[in-house]
Amino acid sequence: MTAKGADRPFYIYLAYSGRTLIVGANQSALQVLIDAGVDIEPGCMLGGCGMCVADFVEGDLIHKDLCLTENDRKALFCPCVSRAGTRIVLPL
């Protein structure tokens, strides 16, 4: 059983390359993307600057950033702090 507030693992599917990445409970999506060779700038790593903002196609995002508007959150996410319930699809 996961403690309240603890992050759970989830999957990132990279639509153009066909790869699936696993984001562990104690990892950021940003670090997993960087480790997989995705060209993405890390920025502040706190969800405040928006430098790492990425497009997403679908998924059950859990937004934890401070920089995106509600409208932005329909198509973007901050992989440095945001997560998914189970899976997200990125156009990469």
Image: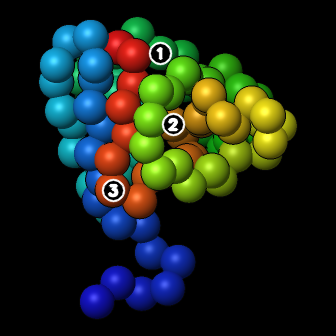
Classify 77 as above or below 36.
Answer: below
The front one of 42 and 78 is 78
Mark 2: which amino acid?
Answer: Pro
- Label 1 neighbourhood size at 10 Å, few (<14), some (14-19), many (20+)? some
The numbered disc on residue 79 is: 2
- Residue 87 percent location from the top left of the image: 33, 47
- Image colouring: rainbow
Specify which label sits upstream in the sequence, 1 or 3: 1
- Residue 57 percent location from the top left of the image: 46, 27
The front one of 26 and 83 is 83
Mark 1: which amino acid?
Answer: Ile
The numbered disc on residue 86 is: 3
Residue at the spot 69% in from the left edge and 37% down from the top edge:
73
Q: In which quarter of the image is the C terminus?
A: top left
Specify which label sits upstream in the sequence, 1 or 2: 1
The residue under label 1 is 40
* Label 3 element class: strand
Q: Identify the image quadrant of residue 43.
A: top right
